Amino acid sequence: MIKMDDQELKKLTRQLIDGTLDTDQFIQKIKSLPFQDLGEVKLDTHRALRKGFAEIVYCPGKSDEQLENIARALANTKENVLFSRAAPHQYEVVLSILHDAYYHEKAKMIGIKRRETQTTVTGLTVVSAGSSDIPVAEEAAVTAEYMGCAPKRLYDIGIAGLHRLLAHIETLQSSLAIVAVAGMEGALPSVLAGLVSCPVIGVPTSTGYGANLSGVAPLLTMLNSCATGVSVVNIDNGLGAGYLAGRIVLQSTN
Amino acid sequence: MIKMDDQELKKLTRQLIDGTLDTDQFIQKIKSLPFQDLGEVKLDTHRALRKGFAEIVYCPGKSDEQLENIARALANTKENVLFSRAAPHQYEVVLSILHDAYYHEKAKMIGIKRRETQTTVTGLTVVSAGSSDIPVAEEAAVTAEYMGCAPKRLYDIGIAGLHRLLAHIETLQSSLAIVAVAGMEGALPSVLAGLVSCPVIGVPTSTGYGANLSGVAPLLTMLNSCATGVSVVNIDNGLGAGYLAGRIVLQSTN
Amino acid sequence: MIKMDDQELKKLTRQLIDGTLDTDQFIQKIKSLPFQDLGEVKLDTHRALRKGFAEIVYCPGKSDEQLENIARALANTKENVLFSRAAPHQYEVVLSILHDAYYHEKAKMIGIKRRETQTTVTGLTVVSAGSSDIPVAEEAAVTAEYMGCAPKRLYDIGIAGLHRLLAHIETLQSSLAIVAVAGMEGALPSVLAGLVSCPVIGVPTSTGYGANLSGVAPLLTMLNSCATGVSVVNIDNGLGAGYLAGRIVLQSTN
Amino acid sequence: MIKMDDQELKKLTRQLIDGTLDTDQFIQKIKSLPFQDLGEVKLDTHRALRKGFAEIVYCPGKSDEQLENIARALANTKENVLFSRAAPHQYEVVLSILHDAYYHEKAKMIGIKRRETQTTVTGLTVVSAGSSDIPVAEEAAVTAEYMGCAPKRLYDIGIAGLHRLLAHIETLQSSLAIVAVAGMEGALPSVLAGLVSCPVIGVPTSTGYGANLSGVAPLLTMLNSCATGVSVVNIDNGLGAGYLAGRIVLQSTN
Amino acid sequence: MIKMDDQELKKLTRQLIDGTLDTDQFIQKIKSLPFQDLGEVKLDTHRALRKGFAEIVYCPGKSDEQLENIARALANTKENVLFSRAAPHQYEVVLSILHDAYYHEKAKMIGIKRRETQTTVTGLTVVSAGSSDIPVAEEAAVTAEYMGCAPKRLYDIGIAGLHRLLAHIETLQSSLAIVAVAGMEGALPSVLAGLVSCPVIGVPTSTGYGANLSGVAPLLTMLNSCATGVSVVNIDNGLGAGYLAGRIVLQSTN
Amino acid sequence: MIKMDDQELKKLTRQLIDGTLDTDQFIQKIKSLPFQDLGEVKLDTHRALRKGFAEIVYCPGKSDEQLENIARALANTKENVLFSRAAPHQYEVVLSILHDAYYHEKAKMIGIKRRETQTTVTGLTVVSAGSSDIPVAEEAAVTAEYMGCAPKRLYDIGIAGLHRLLAHIETLQSSLAIVAVAGMEGALPSVLAGLVSCPVIGVPTSTGYGANLSGVAPLLTMLNSCATGVSVVNIDNGLGAGYLAGRIVLQSTN
Amino acid sequence: MIKMDDQELKKLTRQLIDGTLDTDQFIQKIKSLPFQDLGEVKLDTHRALRKGFAEIVYCPGKSDEQLENIARALANTKENVLFSRAAPHQYEVVLSILHDAYYHEKAKMIGIKRRETQTTVTGLTVVSAGSSDIPVAEEAAVTAEYMGCAPKRLYDIGIAGLHRLLAHIETLQSSLAIVAVAGMEGALPSVLAGLVSCPVIGVPTSTGYGANLSGVAPLLTMLNSCATGVSVVNIDNGLGAGYLAGRIVLQSTN
Amino acid sequence: MIKMDDQELKKLTRQLIDGTLDTDQFIQKIKSLPFQDLGEVKLDTHRALRKGFAEIVYCPGKSDEQLENIARALANTKENVLFSRAAPHQYEVVLSILHDAYYHEKAKMIGIKRRETQTTVTGLTVVSAGSSDIPVAEEAAVTAEYMGCAPKRLYDIGIAGLHRLLAHIETLQSSLAIVAVAGMEGALPSVLAGLVSCPVIGVPTSTGYGANLSGVAPLLTMLNSCATGVSVVNIDNGLGAGYLAGRIVLQSTN
């Protein structure tokens, strides 16, 4: 849409010069260029380049038929693909069409790894406060892995036992980006950001009850962090945090 | 209301026995006892015994005339009195009638100390996260002082700089009750409760902006604390926290 | 983390003095001390001393396998253990490994009593407003029992029938701490705090419908209590209230 | 709108019979009847009969000019008029036109008493929890007075001191309707409804701070009352409660 | 609690006079009077007199065993009893013990009619806006029936078709109290209060979706009614509205 | 209600003239006219003329019996009928009575087409942001179809891929009304309104999780649109949007 | 952005053909066309065509200097301009530069009428519920006037007095679009939509107090309208509603 | 706190070896080391290294005296200092002590530049949707400048005029981090994230009215972004976003 196709433009101008097209025809063609087939195809390519995935498919509410259609459409892609929040039987559906699909059980993600990346880019740390935050943390970690990162996982080190967190201080302080996943009161990102200098992406989770308000409480906690260096994504949005942190790490190591 | 006046009862029964009252008159008098003048006076005394104050007066919205009336009514009390959230000119009004009134400027409280207490009961620590939380913290500390406590004040030691908090670990771990005052994300009480064994009373403050929602964010944080031993009072309610913590300390040292 | 291990330190300094370690090696060892294996184990011990439990396990969302692992890890503890909000079948899982596990049905708690306490410390009263608040009240009462308290239970004495509450006025006024559990409009803690002098821990419950907003209404009521001496924990958080009240009673009777 | 004007209808039918109007003209006139000038005037009369006031004018945001116009329009009414939430200078404006206007200072109401009522209908009690709730309580009491009621006022008898409330139990139990005005936690209507059998109209006030949420907390408390016989009006809406309670008392004594 | 038992008092004073009790024993007995067995029994009687029901039992969450216990305790009452929000199988449980129990299917209420009332007191009208509001409206109507009222039911006459509502204007205008049940936008009570002079009790229902917020939207609508004479009860609280309206009608016709 | 029945009126006036009715009888009859049987029937006709449907039935919560009754009552209507949010088995019920009923599966609507319209009125475009918003979009499209519109459907063209949206710019810019259905952040209507000049009706959907708050987030987004020409309907209310947009298109093409 | 400038394109292609530009230069220029100076100017023209205004300026928070700059930039426009929510002194600022500026006092709008329109397009009715809603209603009416509409104003005809509304039924039923402005409970749009067939644009206002929640209550009411044909704009957004209704009327009369 | 001071440790061990300290004294000193003066000083240094600022001072609510004290304490720092949300007169106060203080008027920030950085690190773009969002955007830009970045500013390019945004596509797509500041509906970050591959930090602003809810609406919009690569900070928190984006850019260019 944005960048027109130079080759096509050159061809058209040549046709204009050699008289194959008159000025009006030429203008008509020029105007139709970026918004039609060519443009779309180019953009999709662009998107893969920019975003690192052929597609990220959000599974809840999708019918088996819809999943099958999507899977078929992706059969020949050379980019990686992720299906998020996939139920086990949805994995069966996808696997029946994409035989290289793998099910990341804890993260509830289906992954198709098509692009060869040496998963050796370090610097990303995924931290979870409690054991029930692990599925969201895994969603973040797996997302980053498909981008080419090798995230370290530090799980169940919430602020109620500061020593557990401090025991990993070296790992934390040498990170290039940290994903901090926490439900309940959600204070983990603030505490972390007071100890490290790299960006901390907070992911509030819906773990908790009562005044937790399905994750609104930790969300507010993280938004109000008095420590610099914290930003926040939606409740339970491990994928978004993992993508963002992976992006930061990748561009910090290039 | 609950405990009737034995002296009065005895007088009435003697009148019944000696015929001054007949049974119906006696019953009529008995029934009117606990809910009238006598009862109210007694209860006020009771209240002072139980609660430690002749009166705690909430100043906002009170006219000068109302304050004068209250001050006059308290002129001869032998219990302590506190006026909370008092503007400087309200102090002038009270001082003109109660000449022993003292203005605690940071706490915005007027105090009348009538009951002799040796302010030497230690064990209460008042902690504030930021410097703008100090007025609320002072309200807590001053309230406890008028109950006979000698609170320690640890101000401006929020979680963004854990080392400042850990430097006072000995004081904190030897406390009998801690009032933890915090705005912004309000994570201080959770972190404290992970380090100490005594009760921690969290006071969320309205310090902050945006998603702080005038103190609702730190309130939710404290209510969701994953550490045991934390309870919470209303936003900016230093008085309530100071009273409660003072009460715990006093009954723990008797 | 905070208190280092004196024995280990002494051993190291002796090695330094006798030349087994040179200064650099010694410093290296010193610095690694409090944040590694040793530290963690010691802290857990510490925590038990401070908090009175080897572990309190929150069961919802835990898989049977996770529960088994936790149970095995706790097999030889000499401290008490509680599993909260445990479903009956989760009790089966824990019992198969910890044969001294007991199921407190109303409280939905599994308890392992390892530390011998004479459960004779009185002074804690657990009050519930309605009959549907009893499970939360029981969670509070059982928690306190495992800390060594002998709580009195006064259930179903809400404010719609004041006489039921007043009938227990002696018990209430002689308490050292009261846990007041109430759903609906949640006014019980305020009424109680007007009658007694000890701390009142309010526990709002999600009992109710419509404008109850799953417990937010009684939570707000309790936070706004105009009576001094009330603090509040999260909705349905009987465990937190029981722990806190037990702590106050224990330190008031030492 | 509902009841057409019989006189006018009779005139028209007579014109139809005597041929002054033909059928079509007649129908045209009939159809336009109830919704035009005549109808409006009649309805206003109706409204006074039904509602007891010529007009109730809400003053905030009204310009002096608007108030003058309204005052002039009401100059000759034979019904009572109330201006609510009137600032002192707005009283000056109204008084300059309606010389029998009276300013109820505490209630911030201007009253014009045109209909002779013997203000002797008893049975309405207006109760306020705190002294800062008095303006709202007065708005209720004054409204009822202009309807012909003689309300009893019981102010400053909140639930933090139950004895003050119980001292007036006879008055409360013999009421035909109670307006219960309360800010803070707003538990007064529930407690009252547990003691009496008549309708209790709860009026939450915006008195309080923090989690009071400008009156939303006592509003929720009252809506969740576990005692039967409570209904609620908007925050600070003394007028609505006074009108409703007055209405109940009047129809209960006819 | 409030009114002591004259007979008992007289007996005691006679024992005092004849020397069976000495003054101290007498005082001891007097003080224990109103808050113990006697007092409670008397109050329950009182409550029935005042409130018109032996008991109103809220069924959700009650176990079969609990219901059986309650049913047995009520076996010999001479007052009416209602069980609200009762599932069909809960009716079976109650019926097995109380053989005169009747199931009001639409209202989901079980009724035991023990007190003979000629259900002929008219003046109560129950209006519902939509057909899905009928269960709540029926809860109100049945409650009033057990108090001795003969409510008129006007269902499905919401404001989207004003003509249906206006068709019943005579019934509405001659009512002594109206219960107006409405979900969706909840404007029915406001429209009604503009047409009638009697009290209108609004009952918001959770009928609706999206921005209805489970009944919060109609609740707010009703609280903000610009027509005088409207008060509101909790979302879906037909019982509370029916009781209150019944009470108003009964005291208006005595 | 508004427009009386001329025929009936003429008959009555003739009876008045010929003496069959006297003036009083005539007035009585006139007054009862518009609000009784006749009026209702006429109004229903009116409604169909104005609103384009004999009835739109909201199915959730309706029993099979209720649906059958409604279906029977509509058996002979000559207007179109829609049943919204109908479960498949509810279609079976309706079909058993109305044999020309058709089930629009994606829209979950049952349609009865009785009025012959050439579905050729163009100018309405229904846009959905994501694939999970399609059911709501279909509800809008089908509603408009039964009004006589031929809506264009542009699905799955959200703002995360602007090029997909821009590819349809010609269709969008030549529309007379656009229904824009979007969940998640709900920015689609704003972006569209920046590109077109016709009215854009935004429909927030409950698609999303966490801070989506069941559709409140996109609802707020749409209400705050900084582009002119956007209005909003309730969350998931495809029917309301489809009706409104259809109405605009129809009156723009007459 | 979408439609490029044909003249410019033709000029460029001619330069390409005659050799003034080579292919690369030509492509470079082509690509820069629609998004730079030329594009912006053209688009503004486009926008005026589509949207009917050169600019609509939101005044709050704008400095005098900013307003002067904007006024100067608009000096020579041939389209109409509106400044909304303009304080009187802001009018002075604008007037000093644009001497044909007119101040619509009630609407708080400054208007510059440059495009000659015969303000005779009828069909738009602006209705307000109360007198305090008039400023918002005027904002809607004035906006439509500058688009070429001649709106009818029906003010102060809320639902508390249905007869006032019904008196204007003819005007309402013959409208092509209605803007319905209402604060308090906000039921006016629902009632109107039950009476008319044209689109009704609801504008909730912040008129009210307490549970009005600054306009959130009427906003929710309007969103939940059970009558078809209602859509809603932001609280107090008279401008948005006026623009939208004007747009509907204009395209319905072409 | 974490890394102890090697020099000090070595001194102590030498004293232990030469007998100046015995083992117990040594252990005592070791344990006090990291949490006292030395530790604090070291950490402050650390913090500057990690965080890039000697101090960031939040001015609202600070008294002149407090600001003077802070300014004096920072007199000799060699790191940069920022005072945020500073009123003009607060600048006077700071300037009187720190003569190299500079006032960034639009950002309302006082800056002290002590550390020499060549402000040439490019890659950060700060985008604002409207002109009233500029103060927040400037806060972000200035913060990044003091960290050593040279941010590009693209202001007033909201989504209502997509062409303005697309005109800067090259700048946006070559950024290493984008701060996107937007009030109203807050859709800008989502649209941007659909066009670029670098991290986008969304900053919702409190610009707007009504359903904007003081910035909560754009906050929710950004949290729900359906485009990957967006994270969010608190409402109006330009500083936090600027710091975070600066951090990402700096570590991406090292």
Image (cartoon, coloured by chain):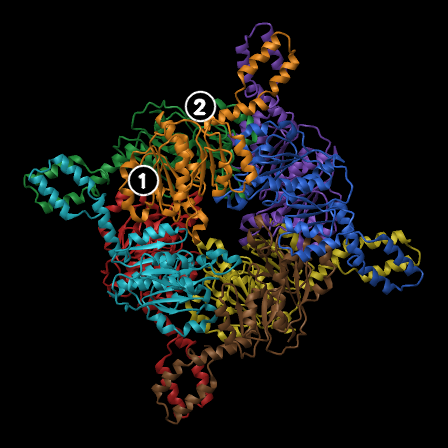
Chain colours: A cyan, B yellow, C brown, D purple, E blue, F orange, G green, H red
Front residue of this view, candidates B116 and D177: D177
Quadrant of the drawing holding the C terminus of chain G: top left
Q: Residues within 10 Å of mark 1 (few under 14, many from 20)?
A: many
Kind of residue at badge 2: Ser
Q: Mark 1 belongs to which amino acid?
A: Gly
Where does the N terminus of chain G fall, quadrant-wise?
top left
Is residue B221 toward the left or the right of residue C139 in the image? left
Q: Quadrant of residue G233?
A: top left
The residue that mark 1 highlights is F194
Q: Is residue H7 above or below residue D222?
A: below
- Using the rendered view, name the quadrant where residue A241 is placed: bottom left
Left or right: E48, with D86 as reference point: right
For the residues labelled 1 and 2, the Cα–Cα distance comes to 31 Å
Q: Would residue F86 be visible to someone looking at this image?
A: yes
Task: Say above or below: H147 vs D143.
Answer: below
* Residue underneath mark 2: G174
Q: Position of residue F12 (x, y in %)?
A: 59, 13
Query: Where does residue E206 sit, x and y in percent of width and height?
Result: 55, 44
Residue D238 visible in image: no
Residue drawn where x is 36% and y is 59% of the image: A239
Of residues D37 and E50, which is closer to you in this image? E50
The disc placed on residue H171 is none
